[in-house]
Amino acid sequence: MHPPVTVTSEIPRRGFLRVAGGAAVALPLGMLAGCGTERDASTLRIAFQQFGSDTNLQRWLAGVAEAFTAKNPGTSVELVPIVASTNDYFTKNELLMASPRSCPDVVFEDSFILQSDIAAGYLQPIDDLVEAWEAWETFYPASKEAAKDPEGRVHFIPTETDTRGIYYHKRVFEKAGLPTEWQPRTWDDIAETAAVIRDANIGATGMFMFCGKAQGETASMQGFEMLLYGTKDTLYNPDTQKWVAGSQGFIDSLAFFKRQFDEGLTLPVARHFDPNLMDAVQATMFPEGELGILIDGSWISFLWAEGSLAPWPTWPEDVGVAAMPTQHGETPGSTTLSGGWGWTIPTHARDRDMSFVLIKELCSLENQVQRNISGGTLTTRRDVAMNEEYRSYSPTVGFFTDMLESAYYRPAFAVYPEVSTALQDTMDTVMVGDKTPEQAAAWYDAKLIELVGEENVETRKA
């Protein structure tokens, strides 16, 4: 008999941990609700996000943990599912990691918040551990880079990633008299196709891109950055190690959003202020043919699988996928952004070496293939990408996986979440018509200097 795998209940939200100026604000231990009891030193805790009643990740973890404890007699694994929205998960997770008494040993971390948690001192570097791990060489270079802090130290084992592109509804295209095999070459091609759908009087909105603060990081990454990185400009210049202000690409990206609203190519402005809009778009509007073009992530077809939240049995026949084109068709012709999740070892983990042994079990080739399939995610590794079971689990997995070799990642700095919020505010002002794209870009430039310091900004002439 091997030690049991246990699952704790959700940690109640009794307090917040705030990070200001890179330092964690300590909370009394009494506020670490549900985690103040002592535990056996041989128990490893895994903390992870659970989306409502979706226990997919928990079931997979339970199976891996059972195998791990069988191989490591005397060690038990405790699963700590944190039922929360994304932002609340970050807060609760930081609350746990802040104290040795409550800290998990392994944490499922979003790459979006990784640098902030590193800067706050919650996570420890694991360079020495990955250097001795043969599987590390199979990870895509971009995924490995995203796992490092600005000094180049590894803190993160990326296990599932994503890319972004265009989904289009073939039945909507047919009704509008459009060809059902479609790959736009430019932004204009997208807008002009959306206009045809708008004018066809078939009860469908032409296109949708996430925009504005109500949509959070989704608007920054699946919206604005999918445009900006298709221009000659980016948010950050790694060659000069400075953030970019004053770029024409920034203005042009905002102008493309303005065009969507001005020309009625997308949903009305008021709909974009609905924080639940994502669910409506992905699970209802697009499947039901109320939307022709959707710029979104590689994972969303998982929602349409049998037994999932919005089953759509005919989606493989009804949906086409296309790469997001560059602005005017410039080389390389398309662009995509990647993010993703992975495993970290907190600073206060009880047993660093055994925590990494557990991570290696989580990341075995067999386990990783099954996790990517069960979670509807893309792999971060070339060996998994070559696995036939992985490549055949979805009609679109090969298309989106092949994008990884040339994908962009968000700037890997602790300040990025604040820069992202400024992007969302900027989109809002253009969306409601308070500012022109030029005025909104100027506001962002001033805010960027405030956030990162003038010495860390290069200003280009638009």
Image (cartoon, rainbow, N blue to C red):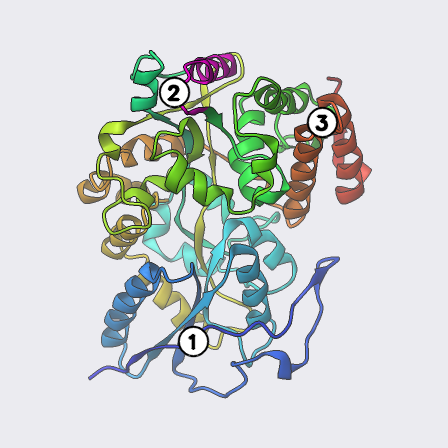
Find out whether residue 192 is within the magenta segment: yes
Dividing the picture into quarters, in which one does residue 245 lie?
Answer: top right
Which one is in front in this view, the residue at disc 1 or the one at disc 2? Answer: 2
Tag shown at residue 202 = 2
Disc 1 marks which amino acid?
Ser
In the rendered image, the quadrant that contains the N terminus is: bottom left
Looking at the picture, tell me which residue is in the foreground, 189 or 273.
273
Neighbor class of circle 1 (other Cα within 10 Å; few <14, some 14-19, many 20+) is few
Write down the region rendered in magenta.
185-205
Q: Secondary structure at mark 1?
A: loop
Residue shown at 49% from the left, 60% from the top: 126
* Left or right of 349, for residue 360: left
Neighbor class of circle 3 (other Cα within 10 Å; few <14, some 14-19, many 20+) is some
Looking at the picture, tell me which residue is in the foreground, 252 or 145.
252
* Residue 212 percent across, percent down from the top left: 62, 37
Instruction: Name the residue beneath numbered marker 3.
Output: 433
- As drawn, 327 above or below 378: above
* Residue 421 percent across, percent down from the top left: 66, 43
Residue shown at 37% from the left, 50% from the top: 136
Instruction: Name the residue beneath numbered marker 1.
Output: 9
Q: CA distance from mark 3 to mark 1?
A: 46 Å
Looking at the picture, tell me which residue is in the foreground, 435 or 198.
198
Q: CA distance from mark 2 to mark 3?
A: 28 Å
Find out whether residue 227 is within the magenta segment: no
Disc 3 marks which amino acid?
Gly
